[in-house]
């Protein structure tokens, strides 16, 4: 038995979906353990693009089981949309998708509240958090407030309807009287939920027991995180964070399997940095000025959000942030993605430390206010003009590209086990295979 956890080591959008898909050739099951449909994973398989939002990335392999753990907040509407999209493409999903009975449900009223709050912040002159407006945060609030409507409530239509009415009375009061936004019609929302429940109930399962049994059979599992470490609600750049724990340790709590079943943590890292939404970003570059490195990263890297279509902010690779991420996750190995986006940049900059209030610091500080005052300290490295796109062997990379990777490895203090040189699952350099490393 050997299990691998895949987490984003930056602010999300690192390319986790492709790597999860690639690794599932060695896995029996893929487990999504946190987040909601605010995540966006894009897979490119033999030139065909698939965008996932809540479905585990293992869905593209016919013989892989897909699990959605209790740490995920689930939109019944969106998961059914994804299921039907794959069925239309000839990919069978329902017989191998298992959704935790404890998943909190995202309803339209959650999204309405999420969007109204952001609009209210902007109206009041307060900086927006930069949420996707999908209702993720309000649903997590329901969870910790012990008022969540959960997957298991579909089993009792009357109880579900009563809970939705009670919740809506509370949220519609807030929408109308505090946020000055339209109320949400309750009965149509209940009717839609009941119909969705009829379709989803056959996929409801006791996911912790299923995963325990899979481990007992010696099956290999892959745990898939959403967003990135620096957006973790506890360890990220608070309050500019997501509403869940995105770190590797939450793979256990988010699916109900013991931490002794997590054996290897793969941190996914872009060869540069991106960030969506608000919050400090020390190495940020101007992405809109043509002829600049920032514009190159944005355009060549196609840096638009899979879920929202928003432009991602872009900047140089931030080693102090990566050090913090590695320590929080207990990272076993790194995968550097989008190396090919750096092709053609004459000189690269690596942020190796910060200066904060006149002092040199080598790891990202915990507070967003402190990070906003950090001045990045850079180390210059030569770039390369040759194309690295699609290369699958390390020694075929330009020497400057190999030097860049080696410097990242030394500064981060964690080995680089994989390098991605393009969006297709085949565009991958493997130095140490996570599953085969564990087997030895």
Image (cartoon, rainbow, N blue to C red):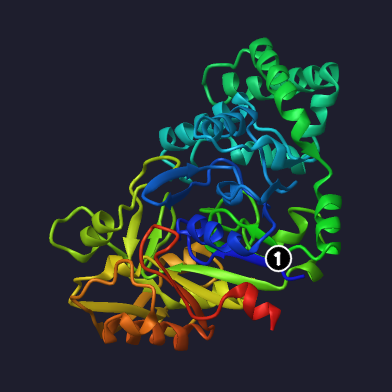
**433 displayed left or right of 251:** left
**Residue appearing at x 38%, y 73% in the figure:** 392
Q: Where is residue 385 in the image (x, y as percent from the top left)?
A: 18, 75
For disc 1, the marked residue is 249
Q: In which quarter of the image is the C terminus?
A: bottom right
**289 displayed left or right of 183:** left
Quarter where residue 366 is shown: bottom right
Q: Quadrant of the N terminus?
A: bottom right
Q: Nearer the viewer, residue 96 or 270?
A: 96
Q: What element carries label 1?
A: loop
Task: Evaluate whether residue 217 shows in this view.
Answer: yes
**267 up-or-down from 65: above or below:** below
Task: Evaluate whether residue 148 shows in this view.
Answer: no
**375 up-or-down from 191: above or below:** below
**Residue appearing at x 38%, y 81% in the figure:** 394
Q: Position of residue 116 (x, y in %)?
A: 51, 29
**Residue appearing at x 40%, y 52% in the figure:** 46
Q: Nearer the viewer, residue 344 or 275?
A: 344
**265 up-or-down from 128: above or below:** below
**394 displayed left or right of 110:** left
């Amino acid at each position: 038995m050997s299990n691998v956890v895949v987490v984003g080591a930056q602010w999300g959008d690192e390319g986790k979906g492709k790597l999860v898909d690639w690794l599932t050739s060695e896995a029996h099951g893929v487990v999504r353990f946190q987040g909601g449909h605010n995540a966006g994973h894009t897979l490119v398989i033999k030139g065909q693009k698939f965008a996932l939002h809540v479905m585990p990335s293992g869905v593209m392999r016919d013989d892989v089981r897909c699990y959605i753990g209790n740490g995920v907040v689930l939109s019944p509407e969106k998961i059914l949309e994804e299921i039907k999209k794959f069925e239309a493409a000839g990919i069978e999903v329902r017989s191998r998708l298992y959704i935790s009975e404890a998943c909190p449900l995202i309803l339209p009223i959650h999204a309405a509240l999420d969007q109204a709050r952001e609009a209210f912040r902007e109206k009041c002159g307060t900086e927006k958090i930069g949420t996707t407006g999908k209702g993720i945060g309000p649903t997590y609030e329901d969870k910790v407030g012990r008022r969540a409507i959960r997957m298991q409530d579909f089993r009792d239509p009357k109880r579900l309807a009563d809970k939705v009415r009670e919740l809506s009375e509370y949220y519609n009061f807030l929408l109308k009287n505090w946020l000055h936004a339209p109320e949400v019609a309750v009965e149509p929302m209940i009717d839609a939920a009941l119909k969705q429940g009829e379709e989803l109930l056959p996929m409801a399962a006791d996911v912790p027991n299923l995963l325990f049994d899979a481990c007992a059979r010696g099956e290999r599992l892959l745990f898939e995180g959403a967003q990135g470490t620096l957006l973790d609600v506890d360890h990220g750049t608070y309050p500019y964070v997501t509403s869940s724990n995105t770190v590797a340790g939450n793979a256990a709590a988010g699916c109900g399997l013991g931490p002794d079943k997590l054996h290897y943590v793969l941190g996914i890292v872009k060869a540069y940095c991106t960030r969506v939404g608000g919050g400090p970003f020390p190495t940020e570059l101007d992405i809109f000025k043509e002829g600049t490195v920032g514009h190159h990263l944005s355009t060549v890297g196609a840096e638009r959000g899979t879920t929202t279509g928003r432009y991602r902010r872009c900047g140089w690779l931030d080693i102090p942030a990566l050090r913090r991420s590695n320590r929080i996750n207990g990272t076993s190995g790194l995968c550097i993605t989008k190396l090919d986006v750096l092709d053609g940049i004459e000189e690269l900059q690596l942020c190796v430390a910060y200066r904060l209030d006149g002092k040199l610091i080598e790891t990202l500080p915990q507070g967003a206010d402190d990070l906003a005052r950090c001045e990045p300290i850079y180390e210059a490295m030569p770039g390369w003009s040759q194309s690295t796109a699609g290369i699958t062997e390390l020694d075929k990379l330009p020497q400057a590209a190999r030097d860049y990777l080696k410097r990242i490895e030394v500064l981060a203090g964690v080995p680089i086990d994989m390098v991605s040189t393009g969006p297709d699952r085949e565009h991958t350099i493997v130095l140490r295979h996570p599953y085969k490393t564990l087997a030895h």
